Image (cartoon, rainbow, N blue to C red):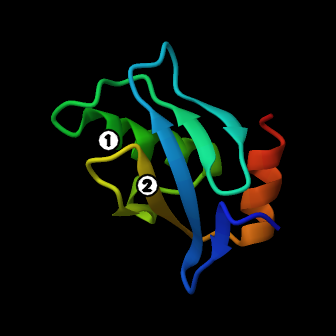
Amino acid sequence: MNKAVQASAHGVVISCRVVPSASRSEIAGMAEDAVRIRIAAPPVDGKANGELVRFLAKFFRVPKSGIEILKGETGKLKRVLVSGIGPEEAFKKLDGEK
């Protein structure tokens, strides 16, 4: 399994490379060390982070409270906890979005 998706006690931790101000929010691909995610919100006043949480909650079908940005609040590289799913499920879903 690649380093972008790691098991956690509460779910999975996903390393993300976020591209803000995209035309739409989507998974843009997977690298060995991070999942590339385009976000349809500007990187101002936490709008991109809010859209990232909303998008990932919808993508993984978990409540918004199940998504937590652990590291990288102000940067493009983020580590995000997705609660309630396993690494195999997350990887399969992310890999299917290529």
Toward which corner of the image does residue 90 lie, by quadrant?
bottom right
**Residue depicted at 32% across the width and 41% down the height:** 50
Q: Residues within 10 Å of mark 2 (few under 14, many from 20)?
A: many
Left or right: residue 88 versus residue 20 is: right
User: Looking at numbered disc 2 in the image, what kind of residue is underneath it?
Assistant: Lys
Label 1: how many Cα within 10 Å (few below 14, some 14–19, many 20+): some
Q: Amino acid at mark 1?
A: Gly
Q: Distance from label 1 to label 2 (Cα)?
A: 13 Å
Vertical comparison of 65 with 93: above or below: below
Q: From the top left corner, tell me how far across and down residue 97 is, in percent.
A: 77, 36
If the image is split into quadrants, where does the N terminus sit? bottom right
Secondary element at tag 1: helix
Query: Could you say which is closer to the camera, residue 97 or residue 15?
Result: 15
Mark 1 highlights which residue? 50
Residue 65 at x, y percent in the picture: 38, 61
Residue at image x 69%, y 66%? Answer: 3
- Residue 13: percent from left, percent from top: 56, 68
Residue on which disc 2 sits: 78
For marks 1 and 2 on the same chain, the one whose residue lies earlier in the sequence: 1
